[in-house]
C-alpha cells in the first residue's frame, strides 16, 4: 500500500527498491577504454520496481534497438490503474 507520509530516507530520494514484474533481456553499448569502439552488453532485468519503505512503484521505459533487441532508457511512475492492478495481484498471491 502506498504510504501518504514517506519517511525521511524516501524524502531524500534514498528508496529501498525491490525489482518485480516480467523478466526481459536488455542490451546497451559501453565505450571501450582507450578506443573509439563500443562493447555491446546485455542483462536480464525485471520491468518494474517498488520501494519497500514508502510503496511507490515505477516501470522501465523500453525501446527497440535496430537489431531487434530492447534497451531501457529510464523509469516512469506507474499509472493509478497499473498501480491498483499490481496491488490486487500481490493480494491474490498472499491468499
Image: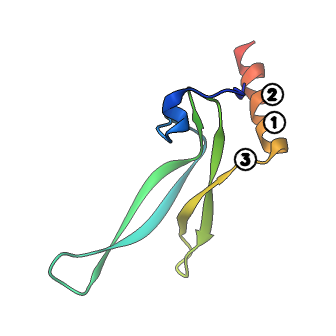
Residue at 75% x, 35% y is 86
SS at badge 1: helix
Mark 3 and mark 2 in contact? Answer it, CB < 8 Å: no
Name the residue nearer the viewer: 67 or 90: 90
Asked whether residue 15 is in view, the answer is yes
Cα distance in 3D space between marks 3 and 2: 14 Å
Expressed as whole percent of the image width and height from the top left, the position of residue 49 reads 58, 41
In which image quadrant can residue 28 be found? bottom left
The residue that label 1 is drawn on is 85
Q: Is residue 36 above or below residue 85?
A: below
Q: Neighbour class for label 2 at 10 Å: few (<14), some, many (≥20)?
A: few
Cα distance in 3D space between marks 3 and 1: 10 Å
Instruction: Give me the disc on residue 88.
Output: 2
- Of the image marks 3 and 1, the number of the one nearer the N terminus: 3
The residue that label 3 is drawn on is 78
Mark 1 and mark 2 in contact? Answer it, CB < 8 Å: yes
Quarter placement of the C terminus? top right
Amino acid at each position: 500500500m502506498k504510504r501518504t507520509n514517506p519517511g525521511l530516507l524516501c524524502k531524500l530520494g534514498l528508496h529501498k527498491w525491490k525489482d518485480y514484474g516480467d523478466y526481459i533481456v536488455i542490451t546497451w553499448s559501453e565505450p571501450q577504454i582507450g578506443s573509439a569502439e563500443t562493447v555491446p552488453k546485455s542483462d536480464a532485468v525485471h520491468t518494474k520496481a517498488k520501494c519497500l519503505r514508502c510503496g511507490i512503484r515505477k516501470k522501465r521505459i523500453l525501446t527497440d534497438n535496430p537489431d531487434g533487441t530492447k534497451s531501457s532508457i529510464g523509469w516512469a511512475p506507474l499509472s493509478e490503474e497499473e498501480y491498483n492492478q499490481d496491488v490486487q495481484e500481490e493480494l491474490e498471491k498472499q491468499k
